[in-house]
């Protein structure tokens, strides 16, 4: 399977966030604003570009642009002609009857992480989790690796300054220590995705490590959604090998930083957890997953809602 980064028509993206990582409350603001203006003509301009956008969102102009960026790349909102609309996924999580409008559950963070890193929309995010081979690294290792890739692929607008800012935003998205190194106090606010513990600092302040291993806070429903999404991109029919699920760029194993033992444990349990949609098979030394049904929108919603219900019940004791 060819990585999206090496497709001839791939368009790299190293900007859009205005150097601000995703923050708590931003996606809820985006959903509320697009629902509020859904019936207004040309609401694409009304929501994010009108003179009152700063007052509506309660942040500066650059942050308004950043909110739109993060809501778009996480598939919370989408463009539809001259309008910006909440997606079904956005309403499911952040809408008026949403499962987690204030991002209180790990399921939400894992879903957003998958949206960012399971697809190649955001070049740095996808490359770092799916192609960068080192487990321990420094910031400049990411920067130089991306610059080398950009030069080889002939990507425009991949200057060192642009890539450096993108890498800094990436690290601040996943590492609370990286966020604390910036100058302005308001810029040091931790991104919700730092709670996942996927990137941690080691030794000196600019030394980082990808935290590969089992992920106890990753719900089975989110893992099942990611597996099916990867399955659709691969174009496989009824079976998918363990090796592809573990190691292929854009796979759950790569994106969630699961080690082989943790991944195998999840796949063995997945038949019961997914109501039979997926079944683990291990015969004659061949490890694979069999997909037994269509993972439609209703099945997705049921699994996601069940995950949040279980989380809430656990909090209630």
Image (cartoon, grey):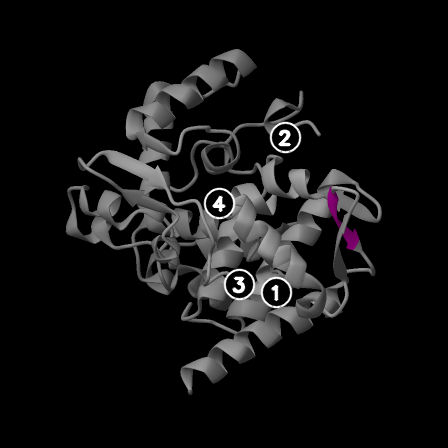
Q: Position of residue 262 (x, y in %)?
A: 53, 52
Q: Earlier in the sequence, mark 4 or mark 2?
A: 2
From the viewer's perspective, tell me whether residue 19 is left or right of residue 110: left
Residues packed near mark 3 inside 10 Å, few (<14), some (14 to 19) or many (20 plus): many
Q: Label 2, on which residue?
A: 4
Residue 189, image x and y in percent? 25, 55
Q: Earlier in the sequence, mark 3 or mark 1?
A: 3
- Which numbered dot is residue 221? 1
Front position in the image: 44 or 214: 214
**Cα–Cα gap, marks 4 and 3:** 34 Å
- Marking on residue 34: 3
Mark 4 → mark 2, Cα distance in angstroms = 19 Å
Of the numbered discs 2 and 1, the one sitting upstream in the chain is 2
User: Is 188 above or below relative to 208?
Assistant: below
Q: CA distance from mark 2 to mark 1?
A: 25 Å
Occupied quadrant, residue 222: bottom right
Classify mark 1: residues with Cα within 10 Å, few (<14), some (14-19) or many (20+).
many
| Image height of 42 relative to 159, above or below | below
Circle nearer the viewer, 2 or 1: 1
The answer to whether any part of residue 97 appears in the image is no
Residue pointed to by mark 4: 257
Identify which residue is drawn at 51% across, 45% down: 259
Q: Is residue 195 above or below residue 21?
A: below
**Residue found farthest to the front:** 284
Of label 4 and label 3, which has the lower sequence position?
3
């Amino acid at each position: 399977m060819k990585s999206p980064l090496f497709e001839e028509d791939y368009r790299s993206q190293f900007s859009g966030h205005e150097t601000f990582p995703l923050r708590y409350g931003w996606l809820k603001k985006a959903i509320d604003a697009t629902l509020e203006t859904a019936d207004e003509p040309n609401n694409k301009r009304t929501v994010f570009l009108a003179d009152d956008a700063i007052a509506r969102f309660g942040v500066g102009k650059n942050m308004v642009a950043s909110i739109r960026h993060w809501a778009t790349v996480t598939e919370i909102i989408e463009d539809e002609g001259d309008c910006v609309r909440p997606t079904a996924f956005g309403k499911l999580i952040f809408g008026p009857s949403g499962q987690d409008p204030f991002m209180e559950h790990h399921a939400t963070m894992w879903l957003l992480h998958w949206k960012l890193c399971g697809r190649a929309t955001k070049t740095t995010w996808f490359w770092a989790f799916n192609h960068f081979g080192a487990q321990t690294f420094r910031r400049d290792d990411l920067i130089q690796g991306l610059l080398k890739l950009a030069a080889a692929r002939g990507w425009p607008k991949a200057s060192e300054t642009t890539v450096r800012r993108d890498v800094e935003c990436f690290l601040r998205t996943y590492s609370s220590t990286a966020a604390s190194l910036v100058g302005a106090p308001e810029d040091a606010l931790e991104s919700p995705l730092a709670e996942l513990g996927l990137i941690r600092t080691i030794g000196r302040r600019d030394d980082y490590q990808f935290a590969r291993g089992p992920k106890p806070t990753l719900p089975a429903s989110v893992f099942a959604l990611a597996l099916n999404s990867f399955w659709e991109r691969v174009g496989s029919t009824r079976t998918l090998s363990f090796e592809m699920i573990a190691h292929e760029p854009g796979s759950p194993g790569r994106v969630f930083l699961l080690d082989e033992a943790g991944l195998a444990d999840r796949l063995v349990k997945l038949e019961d957890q997914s109501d039979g949609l997926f079944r683990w098979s291990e015969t004659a030394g061949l490890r694979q997953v069999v997909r037994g049904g269509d993972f439609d929108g209703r099945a997705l919603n049921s699994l996601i809602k069940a995950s949040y219900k279980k989380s809430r019940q656990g909090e209630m004791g």
